[in-house]
Amino acid sequence: MNDILDLILGALNIIYGERWVAPFVLLPIMFALAAYVRHRAIVTTRPYLDAARRRVQTLKDALGSDSDPVAERSAFAENYIPVSAVMSDDQKGAHSLVLAWREFQESMVDESTSPVRNTNRPAAFFNRAAPKLTMLTFASNIFVGAGLILTFLGLIVALNTAANGMAGQDVSVAKQSLQELLVVAGAKFFTSVAGLGASIWLRFAEHSLSLKVRRETDLICEFLERGLLYVSPQRLAVEQLEVLREQRDQLKFFNTDVALQLSERIGAQFTQAIAPVTASLTALNDNMASVTQGIGAGAREAIEKVSGEQLRGLSETLGDLRGRLDAIGQAVGSSSDDAARQIRLAGEDFAKAASDIRDAFVNLTTQVDGIGQGMAERGEAANAAQKEALETILGSIEVAQTRSVTMVTEILEALKNGSVSAAGKMQEEVGSVLKSGVEASQETFRIAIEESGQALKDTTISLSQAVGEAAQQVERAASGLARTGDNAERTAEAIRSVTDNARVVATSLGDAAQGFSQAAGPVADAARSVNQAANQLAQTITADRAAGTQALGEMKSLAEGVRATQDAAGQAWHDYRARFEGVDRALSEATEKLAQTLADSLTEFREFAQNVDREMAAAVGRLGNTMTQIEEYAESLDEYVEQTRNQREAAE
């Protein structure tokens, strides 16, 4: 171990063996290192100082030349955008200033107002952005320690050398070694002087740079304080409380007056939209009832008018014809049994034919009466069904309207008693209720329209069937009349042949005996009467055919009128349906606009509430930071008081 120690001391003796090493080698080296450290600190700090000076000049220009605080804040608010651009410019050495500006910008309340308000002091952000000159402090301390270490190493080498020299018996050698020890020891203290000098130099450099950095940073904070209006978190909380109170009053007004007005307006608009449909359906019911009654009465009157007159004329003609035939039978009864028998048989056949014709017309009259009565009954049934359908429509409309108004009222009451969450659900509830009300109204109208259309269709089909049956019965009556006319013609031919035979018999009797001339005269008169009756019967048959043709034409025109009425009713129904679709579309658009308006209002209210919550949370967070600082200050003050108390007690 001694050898190792001697080896180390020998190596150090090479450096410290000469007295000039410390003042001319170590001291310049230490000062050169201190100069390098100072230069590096200046180079590192200069970009920050340049960026800070640029920002100071920008803030100074933004404040304007007027020293009034109000004017300075107004000018700063007008020049805020250029100032923010310069403060956010991330140039060389300005990164910490940009971060500090961004953090400080978050503490501003509203950058678009004049003056711009902030809730935190800028010094809390920009003082942290200033560069810390810890390298100079560290280097100054190191230089002091290095100087002391080098001094002690030199003393160790000098003492070791002196000890070796004084180990001998020669006093002069020992004296010389002691002198060299003192000389070398004095020279070695130059290292301590060099360390202390370098440390002091670095300390002055640190102080100078710190003053420059602090001055520029303080100017930035000062100009920001002059351009901004500081608002404490407590004052901001009070303002927010006032805004919340105003919102509470507005919500009360919205939940009471606006809700009631909304309910009344929805009910009025719904009633106004349904009123034309109700009036149209009522008018349609009245028109259909009048058309049905008019068709039944007209058909019955036309059939009775046409058939009654012809039947009465035919009955009178047949009565006259029968009377004349009886007179002819009585007149020729004495002339010849064969002729009388033929005439009697012909009269009986003709009487039977007349009776059949009368029965046929009686049946026709009965059937026509039945047809008219059936048409009247069907019209009344259709009228009753249509009235019932309309009553169902009106009842369903009233129920749907009542249900819509009730549900809207319930929703509005729920909104009145609810909170912000209930207000958020109002949009969905109102949209679903209005949609269900519109769907219920559409379904009710569709069912009512189908029922009314089906009833109208059934009535029209029944009316068409009744008219067809009446036309068929009229055709069958016309066929019966034609067959009766044919039988009458055949009877007339038989009577004509009998008359011819009677004329031959009369001529023969005239030739045989002049005494029967008086008896032949009545026979001739009877023959002429029979001829006249036959001609009248033929005319009556022709008139009946014309009357039947006329009645058939009137029935056809009646059927065409019914068809035209049905087409008009269909067109009217199409118009009513188009009008209803327009009303439904208008109601749907009004409902969508109402739902959209409510959605926009609720969205704005929700966004406003979120912004208020966010700002309150930020304010509370900043207040928490402030309280933390206050707690730290309180703890520091407690420690200071405790230290003062301890010092006072120690002094006492």
Image (cartoon, rainbow, N blue to C red):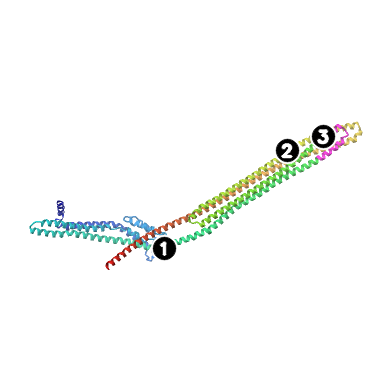
Residue lying farthest to the right in this orientation: 515
Which mark sits nearer the N-terminus, 3 or 1? Answer: 1
Q: Dot 2 surroundings within 10 Å: few (below 14), some, or many (20 or more)?
A: some
498 versus 132 height, above or below:
above
Q: Position of residue 78 (x, y in %)?
A: 40, 61
Image point (29%, 61%), residue name: 212
Q: Quadrant of residue 318?
A: top right
Q: Position of residue 613 (x, y in %)?
A: 43, 57
Q: Is residue 337 magenta?
A: yes
Element at label 1 = helix
What secondary structure characterizes most of the magenta part?
A: helix
Q: Is residue 12 magenta?
A: no
> Mark 3 — residue?
346
Query: Is 134 on the left or on the right of 467, as rendered?
Result: left
For the residues marked 3 and 1, what is the alpha-carbon distance in whole angstroms? 132 Å
Residue 164: which disc?
Answer: none
Q: Dot 3 surroundings within 10 Å: few (below 14), some, or many (20 or more)?
A: many
Element at label 3 = helix
Work out whether residue 115 can be spotted. no
Q: Quadrant of residue 469?
A: top right
> Mark 2 — residue?
476
Which mark sits nearer the N-terminus, 2 or 3? Answer: 3
> Mark 1 — residue?
235
* Range of magenta residues: 318-346
Query: Is 562 on the left or on the right of 206, as rendered?
Result: right
Residue type, label 1 = Arg
For the residues marked 2 and 1, what is the alpha-carbon distance in whole angstroms? 106 Å
Nearest to the observer: residue 475 or residue 395: 395
Residue type, label 3 = Ala
344 versus 435 height, above or below:
above
Element at label 2 = helix
